[in-house]
Image (cartoon, grey):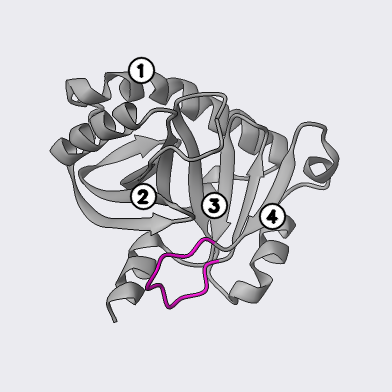
Amino acid sequence: MSRAFPAELDDLKRDLTRFEQSLQDFAQRLGLRLNDLEVDHIAVRCHQETTAARWQQGLGQIGTCFSEAMINGRPICLFKLHQPLSLAGWDLDVIELPWPGEKRYRHEGWEHVEVVLRGDPETLGRRAMALLSDEALTQPGISFKTSSPQGENERLPNPTLAVTDGQTTIKFHPWRLEEIVASEQG
């Protein structure tokens, strides 16, 4: 995508360069080689429902909403872009738009990418941690969180390991979002 966003996404367009640099800097701190990773999608965060509604309208102009589900008590919309978004050497065609929840993020805009680590969901955390440098595990300001977000009809186990510095996050999952959504259908 030539970063030609509709007016409803002007703030996200301006924020993309900041996020890309922050992502590359964070990956370097972690010892991750971005080009070696299968990245499924990119996600945004916002504080206000009006912002989420505006972003939903804008994303609907450049993509198609293929899922709207309640996850952890809030709606999350997934958009398949008509043209991929180029970011850090990847062509990403899925954007995750969660509605605001109880947690407040430091920044409204692009917040994380999700990496697919194929294999046994039971060993996801161990396999993800093995990708990080030894120094990453002891750096101040870097935190790790495991969770298992699940939509109402999901049939695939979807453990998550999130690694963050409080501003930029890289999450690891065993499945692509489109595979998770397909599991709900069948």
- Which mark sits nearer the N-terminus, 3 or 2? 3
Q: Are marks 4 and 1 in contact (CB under 8 Å)?
A: no
Between circles 4 and 3, the one closer to the viewer is 4
The kind of residue on which mark 3 rests is: Asp
Between the residue at mark 4 and the residue at mark 2, the CA separation in whole angstroms equals: 31 Å
Q: Residue 103, image x and y in percent?
A: 56, 37
Between circles 1 and 3, the one closer to the viewer is 1
Between the residue at mark 3 and the residue at mark 2, the CA separation in whole angstroms equals: 31 Å
Q: Are marks 2 and 1 in contact (CB under 8 Å)?
A: no
**Residue behind mark 2:** 75
Between circles 4 and 1, the one closer to the viewer is 1
The kind of residue on which mark 4 rests is: Leu
Q: Secondary structure at mark 2?
A: strand
Q: Which residues are magenta?
A: 149-158
Q: Residue at x 70, y 40 (%)?
A: 30
Q: Nearer the viewer, residue 78 or 134?
A: 78
**Residue behind mark 3:** 36
Q: Is residue 51 magenta?
A: no
Q: Residue at x 48, y 21 (%)?
A: 18
- Which mark sits nearer the N-terminus, 4 or 1? 1
Q: Total label count?
A: 4
- Which mark sits nearer the N-terminus, 2 or 1? 1
Which of the numbered marks, if any, corresponds to residue 14?
Answer: 1
Between the residue at mark 4 and the residue at mark 3, the CA separation in whole angstroms equals: 10 Å
Q: Residue at x 68, y 51 (%)?
A: 145
Q: Residue 56, image x and y in percent?
A: 24, 37
**Residue behind mark 4:** 131
Q: Secondary structure at mark 1?
A: helix
**Residue placed farthest to the bottom in the image?**
186
**Residue placed farthest to the left in the image?**
61
Q: Residue 13, image x and y in percent?
A: 32, 22
Q: Is residue 157 magenta?
A: yes
